[in-house]
Amino acid sequence: MSSTEFSDRAEMDRLGLDPTEFVATDDEGRAIAGLDPDQVVATPVLAVVGRPNVGKSTLVNRMLGRREAVVQDVPGVTRDRVVYDGLWNGRRFKLMDTGGWEPDANGLQAVVAQQAETAMRTADAVMLVVDASVGATATDQAVARVLRRSDVPVLLAATKVDDDRLNSDTTELWRLGLGEPHPVSGLHGRGSGDLLDAILDVLPETPRDTFGAGGSGPRRVALVGKPNVGKSSLINKLSGETRSVVHEVAGTTVDPVDSLVELDGDVWRFVDTAGLRRRVRTASGTEYYASLRTSSAIDAAEVALMLIDASEPITEQDQRVINQIVESGRALVILFNKWDLVDEDRRHELERELDRGELQSVRWAERVNVSALTGRATRRVAPAMRRALESWDTRIPTGRLNGWLSDLVAATPPPVRGGKQPKILFATQAQTRPPTFVLFTSGFLEAGYRRFVERRLREEFGFAGSPIRLSVRVREKRPRKK
């Protein structure tokens, strides 16, 4: 436990607050989870990976002890990575349920390698799920080859082992080179307890630092936006050489392309991604895989550069990609590209679009007007990313946070709800990357007041370029003793 977390717990003890008496609530005031003291700090993540329809989501539900992941008897139901909170033998961890891997027209290796590498970058351990009744397929073997090179622990789960007669089917899975296969039945629960014990053995007590701060490597930048917005051209301009193929036909880039680029004395790892045309759920074929790999690049990055074509109106797709970046919790810089094509009329029209609120939800993100063609203002990109990452890494001391909050509540108390005015008893910053704050209260806080607190947080402490997450824990009403 870090010194910050210890001081928070000590301060709560001093105030006579028991964290176990609080429950999390959503924006409507509904309880969504109990709060153990350990929930205030980050927990390690296990990525569950494997082919479509091998029973990953069924197994995830079994390990959670509740039906959370969507299960259907057709392959490919799970597409996006979804994270759930798990608990076993008093230890908390997170399960990352992933979409299934399968070959596409462009070849198996590209899809498998990208997905496996993303899981390795974002998780503390990986569990490969294989259908024991089918055996190790070519896809399973390709995934195993990538995972064997991983620097995180890897477990092998053999699913659909519903009785002892099928145990022999798991022996051939040793040849995957991932150690002992753990036979389990997600449907009946057979072997799930032993598997959970094995998971706790390999998971660290706290999450590893997966990002590049502190000199552990170049900081990762995801370059995202619609097709033909100029992402590859910007990479080429920043690097001073041709790193990515550029063509007037939209959609030239399909796979993410990693480039090490030195800017202002620092080396950055840029990932030039395919343009996102539509929602991942409605994409198909190579476009689906391109969208999936682009989403993976955002999740694995620390800061996202969102390119918007300044010469055209801001679209719903632009806003959808920005929302995806915010939901992923990454730092954000917005680049209005093709500024060399913007005349006076378009400049006024763009100002009206911004005033109408097309980007109101990310007013905190720094905006830079650039031209990948001429190099206009590209020197401002690196300083903007540094400022965004500095905000992303910022931690507010508990004493300073609560002193500021006391003054704020005294000047503007929460609105009355149900005839009672809720009190904010204590606040703590649970984590950074992105900055995440927890408010312990005596009653529900309206969504409007939460937004007010977030807005004033930014006014006081900055956080330019970084999303903020604010959650509320309401003290449970306990029955009076007779």
Image (cartoon, rainbow, N blue to C red):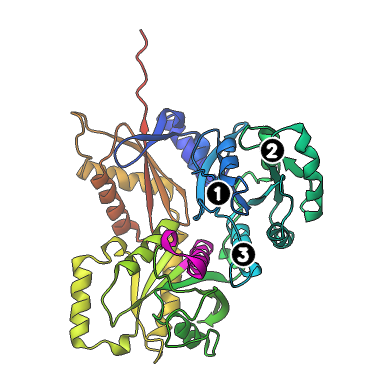
The stretch drawn in magenta includes residue 286? yes
Label 2 element class: loop
Magenta part of the chain:
280-303
**Residue receiving disc 3:** 103
Above or below, 450 relative to 474: below
Q: Is residue 410 visible?
A: yes
Residue at 64% in and 32% down: 189
Image spot of residue 112 (x, y percent): 63, 63
Residue at 46% in and 88% down: 247
**Between marks 1 and 3 in the image, the one whose residue lies nearer the viewer:** 3
Q: Give neighbour class at mark 3: few <14, some 14-19, many 20+ (Cα, 10 Å).
A: some
- Measured in 3D between alpha carbons, the distance from the residue under mark 2 to the one under mark 1, in whole angstroms, is 17 Å
Tell me, for residue 97, which label it has, or none.
1
**Residue receiving disc 2:** 184
Image spot of residue 240 (x, y percent): 52, 90
Which residue reaches farthest bottom?
Answer: 374
Q: What is the total number of numbered labels drawn onto the structure image?
A: 3
Q: Specify the principal SS of the magenta part.
A: helix
Classify residue 137 as left or right of residue 277.
right
Label 3 element class: loop
- Measured in 3D between alpha carbons, the distance from the residue under mark 1 to the one under mark 3, in whole angstroms, is 19 Å
Mark 1 / mark 3, whichever is N-terminal: 1
Q: Is residue 177 visible?
A: no
Mark 2 / mark 3, whichever is N-terminal: 3
Amino acid type, residue under disc 3 in the picture = Pro
Residue at 73% in and 62% down: 145
